[in-house]
């Protein structure tokens, strides 16, 4: 008898709107308008750029940063990749030259004297093309 009563209460709850339908969408349907006199512009993507980068430990426990540079330009490019690593107050910078054929990607890799474990527990990394 109690089971029928419970099922009856559940059925009443479902039909009264508790789970009677999916929630409706909320919020704006379009992005807000640009401020007056300040049109929005999509930033231009540079033809030669860092595609990916990551870091790992070397066999002797130091930090190694590696990644890829992509070249969407119409000709081969020789670029300098700068990797900046900061651990606490200590900052290290390494530059490496990378030759990238048109429409291709090329890999880069730099090693630091910084201990991997020290970097992994709160270091900063910045990879840019000069």
Image (cartoon, rainbow, N blue to C red):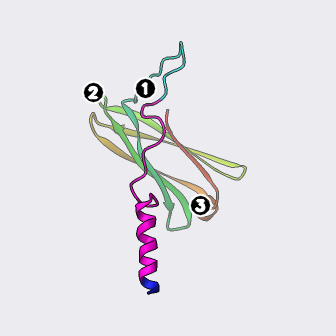
Q: Position of residue 8 (x, y in %)?
A: 42, 74
Residue 122 sits above or below residue 35 on the image: below
- Give the distance between the C-alpha atoms of the residues marked 1 and 2, in whole angstroms: 22 Å
Q: Position of residue 14 (x, y in %)?
A: 42, 64
Find out whether residue 93 is within the magenta segment: no
- Give the distance between the C-alpha atoms of the residues marked 2 and 3, in whole angstroms: 38 Å
Q: Which residue is mark 3?
A: 120
In this view, the residue in front, 76 or 46, is 46
- Disc number at residue 50? none
Q: Earlier in the sequence, mark 1 or mark 2?
A: 1
* 10 Å crowding of disc 2: few (<14), some (14-19), many (20+): few
* 10 Å crowding of disc 1: few (<14), some (14-19), many (20+): few
Q: Which residue occupies the extreme top position in the image? A: 37
- Give the distance between the C-alpha atoms of the residues marked 3 and 1, in whole angstroms: 34 Å
In this view, the residue in front, 6 or 98, is 6
Q: Which residue is mark 1?
A: 42
What count of labels does the image hold? Answer: 3
Q: Secondary structure at mark 2?
A: loop
Residue 60 sits above or below residue 106 on the image: below
Q: Earlier in the sequence, mark 3 or mark 1?
A: 1
Range drawn in magenta: 4-31
């Amino acid at each position: 008898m109690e089971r029928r009563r419970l099922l009856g209460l559940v059925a009443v709850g479902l039909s009264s709107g508790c789970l009677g339908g999916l929630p409706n969408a909320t919020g704006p349907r379009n992005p807000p308008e640009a401020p007056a006199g300040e049109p929005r512009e999509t930033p231009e993507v540079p033809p030669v750029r860092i595609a990916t980068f990551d870091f790992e430990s070397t066999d002797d426990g130091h930090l190694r940063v590696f990644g890829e540079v992509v070249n969407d330009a119409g000709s081969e490019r020789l670029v300098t990749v700068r990797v900046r690593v900061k651990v606490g107050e200590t900052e290290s910078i390494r530059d490496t030259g990378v030759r990238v054929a048109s429409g291709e990607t090329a890999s880069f890799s730099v090693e630091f004297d910084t201990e991997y474990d020290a970097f992994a527990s709160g270091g900063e990394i910045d990879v840019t093309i000069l």
